[in-house]
């Protein structure tokens, strides 16, 4: 049996290296995403622990798992989280939760993040070799580390979010995982949705559901006063002139933009009653699903978002002057989620629940032609897709 397992591992590595070796010369980029089961009894953890990070080409070929060795222990899983700017490294989250803590959460309908019950780390996985580095475990400061990104315009830095004393904090660290710096040190508020402007000089985050903009070192933080109790997931426009986020009431919030200096607050679109979360399980989920937030178009002149049209959640594109275009018109009950524009701006990647199954699709924006990327069976889902950057589509 050991010999068979060894042979299988060698074959898988050969397949992986072959795919990686072809990457620089091919015109079809990779897409990273996560597959999981959705209908297992037992609630959230019973299904989430089946999550595995995946890659597939944008034409639907070459689908395979990545960093499988990270999820071999009981109650562990992996999730595809991002790419390096050059597309050569995948960002993979490895999660573990104890069955005892999971049972407590199901009974109390809330999360209980403790070092005894959780361990969340983020790995950098090289495509060419498959080497996985647990970057957040270097000089560890938390048992829960997520949201890692490569700092724009500074190849020596990374950003991520860690839970400290029960609150989430944004951190900056060196590329090797050392010198972790808390950008909201001593804060007793929950900070999330952390990201940087494209020039690397400014940051944005929401703290207790209020949006803040600050300098890269966390100084000169300024709250964006919207008059709304719920403000979530700020992201910078490609030119750094605007910040996009959702604002309103919880489960009744809509895409807004504000200038980088905090002026010019404007509601761009209305989601028509859509709660703004994708329920990614087919069994009761005490948390209610995964946030489904708007995203910038590559040229920064419009955004993509999801919203309710009739009895379906459809895809929309809206310009910064408020001109809206509905991209999909689907049978009743269809659910679209997590839109992501391609690196060249010509295509849109997204999830869509049709016939009860959450699959991934790519749309050619010029003619609205769709290409389905996954062929999952009932009881499975494809979630959280990410385009590989820097690869041009023909």
Image (cartoon, rainbow, N blue to C red):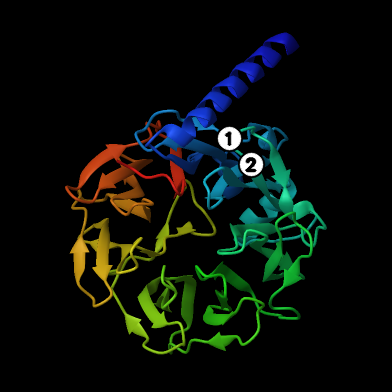
Residue 117 appears at what percent x and percent y?
A: 75, 53
Which image quadrant: the C terminus?
A: top left
Query: Mark 2 falls on what kind of element?
Result: strand
**What numbered label is drawn on residue 125?**
2
Q: Nearer the viewer, residue 386 or 255?
A: 386
On the rendered structure, is 125 left or right of 196? right
Which image quadrant: the N terminus?
A: top right
Residue 274 appears at what percent x and percent y?
A: 33, 65
Residue under the image location 49 percent in, 37 percent down: 55
| Residue topped by disc 1 | 66
Residues at marks 2 and 1, CA–CA distance in whole angstroms: 9 Å
On the rendered structure, is 162 left or right of 295? right
- Residue positioned most to the front: 25
Q: Is residue 87 above or below residue 155?
A: above
Which class describes the residues within 10 Å of circle 2: few (<14), some (14-19), or many (20+)? many
Residue under the image location 70 percent in, 51 percent down: 121
Residue 189 appears at what percent x and percent y?
A: 66, 79
Q: Nearer the viewer, residue 18 or 369?
A: 18
């Amino acid at each position: 049996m050991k010999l068979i397992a060894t042979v299988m591992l060698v074959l898988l590595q050969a397949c992986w290296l072959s795919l990686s070796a072809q990457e620089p010369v091919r015109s079809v980029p990779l897409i990273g995403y996560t597959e999981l089961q959705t209908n297992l009894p037992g609630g959230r953890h019973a299904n989430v622990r089946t999550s595995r990070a995946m890659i597939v080409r944008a034409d639907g070929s070459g689908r395979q798992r990545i960093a499988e060795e990270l999820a071999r222990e009981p109650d562990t899983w992996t999730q595809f989280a991002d790419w390096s700017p050059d597309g050569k490294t995948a960002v993979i989250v490895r999660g573990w939760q104890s069955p005892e803590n999971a049972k407590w959460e199901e009974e109390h309908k809330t999360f209980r993040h403790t070092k005894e019950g959780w361990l969340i780390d983020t790995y950098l996985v090289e495509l060419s070799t498959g080497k996985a580095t647990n970057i957040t475990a270097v000089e560890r400061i938390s048992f829960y580390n997520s949201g890692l990104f490569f700092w724009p315009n500074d190849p020596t830095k990374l950003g991520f979010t860690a839970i400290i004393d029960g609150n989430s904090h944004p951190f900056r660290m060196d590329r090797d995982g050392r010198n972790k710096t808390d950008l909201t040190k001593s804060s007793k508020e929950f900070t999330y949705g952390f990201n940087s402007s494209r020039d690397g000089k400014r940051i944005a985050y929401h703290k207790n559901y209020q949006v803040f903009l600050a300098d890269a070192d966390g100084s000169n933080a300024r709250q964006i006063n919207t008059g709304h109790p719920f403000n979530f997931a700020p992201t910078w426009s490609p030119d750094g002139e605007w910040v996009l986020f959702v604002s309103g009431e919880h489960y009744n919030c809509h895409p807004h933009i504000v200038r980088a200096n905090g002026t010019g607050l404007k509601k761009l679109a209305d989601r028509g009653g859509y709660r703004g979360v994708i329920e990614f399980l087919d069994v009761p989920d005490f948390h209610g699903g995964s946030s489904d937030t708007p995203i910038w178009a590559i040229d920064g002149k419009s955004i993509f978002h999801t919203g309710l049209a009739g009895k379906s959640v459809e895809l929309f594109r809206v310009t910064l002057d408020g001109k809206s275009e509905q991209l999909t018109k689907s049978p009743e009950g269809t659910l679209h989620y997590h839109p992501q524009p391609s690196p060249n701006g010509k295509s849109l990647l997204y999830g869509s629940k049709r016939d009860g199954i959450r699959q991934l699709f790519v749309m050619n924006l010029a003619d609205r032609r769709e290409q389905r990327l996954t062929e999952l069976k009932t009881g499975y889902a494809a979630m959280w897709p990410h385009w590989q950057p820097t690869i041009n589509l023909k």
